[in-house]
């Protein structure tokens, strides 16, 4: 019996039930844009994040003291909420020490689907820190791609490939999951220019048509690196204390 830890990649929430037994580290990724936003908000000093699935649940926090209530559907910000889901909106001092209540099309759903596990939030913003966090633990790992409305998406799978490759190269992990192989091979084809590689991908084009290409560029090549790993504790994402 190998003492290596198991590594898996779940390419879509529709497949999550195949990986959900036991208690493992679930690395939730929604590169465009929910987990990039959450990583950015922590970098700019948000206290904690409550990820909710429905607009109604988010709306219940409106007007609550020290709360920012943010919502996105189909990549668009919604009227009646403080913020949308663009990382640039969170790059300010106003958010310092506040609670962010966030609902998005895919990312916040994935976070809630995985809540019985050790859930951490990953993006290219905090990639290195996520890797270090995982290295210093013992559980098996599942990289969970948020996808798009249950479908596979390219950007999350690319991220999963980059992280999976680094973990397998650390020699602490083993995998007999073809999703891991597929994600790594996808990343290897794209690693020189992720933005160009995603030229024809669905969500990059959705954001393009909404004049949000700067968001895509930032989420794929962040202008800063965060040393914070958001982790789910008692229903809230808080910064993991090293
Ligand atoms: C999501 O959760 O579906 C995404 O973050 C969508 C987006 O805001 O681009």
Image: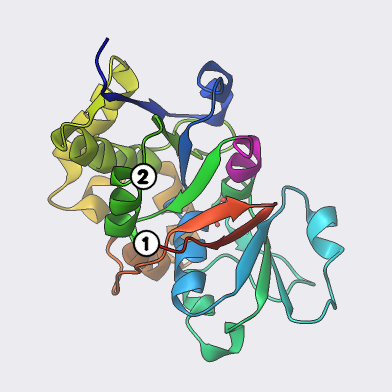
Position above or below: 61 against 91: above
Instruction: Indicate if the residue with disc 1 has its beta carbon within 8 Å of ligand 1.
Output: no
Q: Are marks 1 and 2 in contact (CB under 8 Å)?
A: yes
Prevailing secondary structure class for the magenta stretch in the rendered image: helix
Image point (63%, 35%), residue name: 116
Estimate the x, y position of residue 126 in percent, counting from the top left: 35, 61
Q: Is residue 54 left or right of residue 149?
A: right
Tell me, yes or no, if residue 33 can be seen here: no
Per the image, the residue denoted by label 1 is: 219
Mark 1 or mark 2, which has the lower sequence index?
2
Estimate the x, y position of residue 215 in percent, counting from the top left: 41, 67
Q: Is residue 198 magenta?
A: no
Position above or below: 61 against 97: above
Residue 155 numbered tag: 2
Estimate the x, y position of residue 100 in percent, counting from the top left: 66, 69
Position above or below: 210 against 149: below
- Residue farthest toward the top in the current orientation of the protein: 1
Q: Which residues are magenta?
A: 109-116
Tell me, yes or no, if residue 68 can be seen here: yes
Image point (31%, 67%), residue name: 222
Image point (29%, 26%), residue name: 180
The quarter holding residue 75 reads: bottom right
């Amino acid at each position: 019996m190998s003492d290596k830890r198991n590594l898996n990649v779940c390419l879509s929430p529709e497949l999550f039930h195949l990986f959900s037994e036991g208690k493992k580290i679930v690395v939730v990724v929604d590169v465009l844009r929910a987990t990039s936003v959450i990583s950015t908000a922590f970098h700019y000093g948000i206290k904690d994040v409550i990820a909710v699935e429905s607009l109604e649940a988010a709306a219940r926090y409106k007007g609550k003291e020290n709360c920012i209530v943010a919502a996105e559907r189909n990549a668009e910000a919604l009227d009646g909420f403080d913020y949308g889901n663009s990382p640039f909106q969170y790059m300010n001092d106003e958010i310092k020490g506040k609670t962010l209540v966030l609902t998005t099309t895919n990312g916040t759903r994935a976070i809630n689907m995985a809540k019985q596990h050790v859930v951490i939030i990953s993006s290219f913003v905090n990639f290195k820190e996520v890797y270090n966090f995982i290295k210093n633990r013992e559980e098996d790992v599942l990289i969970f791609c948020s996808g798009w409305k249950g479908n596979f998406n390219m950007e999350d799978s690319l991220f999963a490939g980059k992280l999976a490759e680094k973990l397998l190269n650390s020699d602490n992990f083993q995998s007999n999951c073809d999703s891991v192989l597929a994600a790594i091979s996808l990343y290897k084809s794209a690693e020189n220019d992720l933005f160009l590689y995603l030229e024809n991908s669905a969500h990059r084009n959705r954001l393009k048509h909404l004049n949000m290409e700067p968001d895509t560029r930032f989420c794929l090549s962040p202008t800063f690196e965060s040393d914070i790993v958001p982790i789910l504790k008692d229903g809230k994402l808080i910064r993991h204390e090293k």
